[in-house]
Image: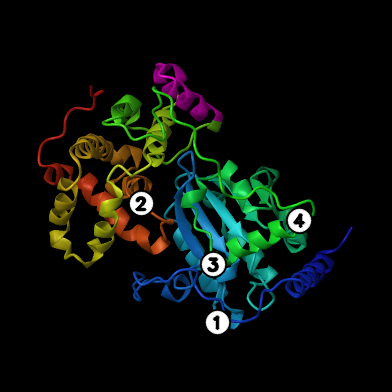
Amino acid sequence: MSSSADLEQLAEIELQKEEEGSCVTDGPSAPPVSTPSLDPSHPYYDVARHGIIQVSGDDHYGRKLIVFSSCCLPPSHQLNHRRLLEYLKFTLDQYVEMDYILVYFHYGLRSSNKPSLKWLREAYSEFDRKYKKNLKALYVVHPTNFIRIVWNLFKPLISHKFGRKLTYVNYLAELREHLNYEQLFIPPEVLRHDEELRATQKGGPPPSVKTPPPRPPLPTQQFGVKKRCQLMSVNASRCVSGLRTEGLFRRSARVQLIKEVQKLYNLGKPVNFEQIGDVHVPAVILKTFLRELPEPLLTFRVYSQVQELLHVESSLRVTRCKQIVESLPEHNFIVAKYLLCFLHQVSQESIINKMSPSNLACVFGVNLVWPRHGSISLTALTPINIFAELLIEHVHTVFGSRCPPAQVMP
């Protein structure tokens, strides 16, 4: 059996082989996207500006997606890896109370920019139970022998339960089986590398990440279609019975159960949530419905207006939110009012359920507003979350009247 020192040396050799066999150079890494909205006063500006860590909305079942891209790591002498660890924890701390998923893009890691194995051990030891408990999956994209050797090196430290969360993803196309691929933040370098890998495969490349045109929706279909006031049929008020449930909207439910409920809705059949007996199921269904709309409930048009909210004086932001909401089409306004009133009611029980307007905004912001093209960068999340928080907290002012009682709307 190989010793720890032998495995470390073997890992270094494998990494050098990978560098020699690829077009990765030792030049400085550039951020995959510009980050003009990143405030230089950000507590981790020195790390965040590289774009190494991004939050890419939610997966199909309401779990937050956090992406770590090795190709964005600058040479080690340009980055304090202790600060990188602190920034990673700073980012995760905003989401670890809810179920979340990590996606690690391995391509671009090289001798000049990789953190030390000592750093990796330190990172794993610092990620205590609160980080590991709600991590539902870890996807390692484009794994190499280096990754497999490092995994074996860490096996004595890793619990069997945590180990089952790891999934190797050889091609980006495979991510479609697990995630909302279109909303996933993927650096251009990783996209190019995937194309090169597929082109060099014997017998032809595996299927492209392009998907066939979607089939026409069923007449009864509820999810993934745009229909006037259709949110009512999702029956969000079923969640009311669990308003005092701690972590409401932060937890996911069994994936198979969610699929079964979606199928019932799409076939036009009734769903008995009392019989299911899990308050997190209707909560996830509500988030899933919003996320699968072809256009966000608050429309594509408001995205740029929301991004500009940081430039509005704090005392005027509620008024600005009211102006944005009043510009919505009538049916979007009606559904948004009903939903935000409901979330306001949830927040009124925050002493018990721990879901303050800020926490609810963190969950729902990216499900209410997203850009027409591309994914939401980590820096773009701040104004979105502020916007959603203001809507929830000041719902009566923004929508101009008292909220209706929490009941099924016709």
Closer to the camera: disc 1 or disc 4? 4
Is residue 106 visible in the rendered image? The answer is no
* Name of the residue lying farthest toward the right: 1
Q: Any magenta on residue 274?
A: yes
Name the amino acid type tagged 2: Trp
From the image, tell me which residue sits under label 2: 370
Q: Which residues are magenta?
A: 256-277
- Tell me the residue at 14%/52% (across/down): 323
From the image, tell me which residue sits under label 1: 78
- Tell me the residue at 46%/56% (across/down): 55
- Tell me the residue at 45%/70% (across/down): 48
From the image, tell me which residue sits under label 3: 85
Q: Nearer the viewer, residue 213 or 220?
A: 213
Mark 4 touches mark 2? (CB < 8 Å):
no
From the image, tell me which residue sits under label 4: 201
Which mark is first along the chain, 1 or 3?
A: 1
Whole-number angstrom distance, CA of label 3 to CA of label 2: 28 Å
On the image, the x and y values in percent for residue 44 come to: 43, 72
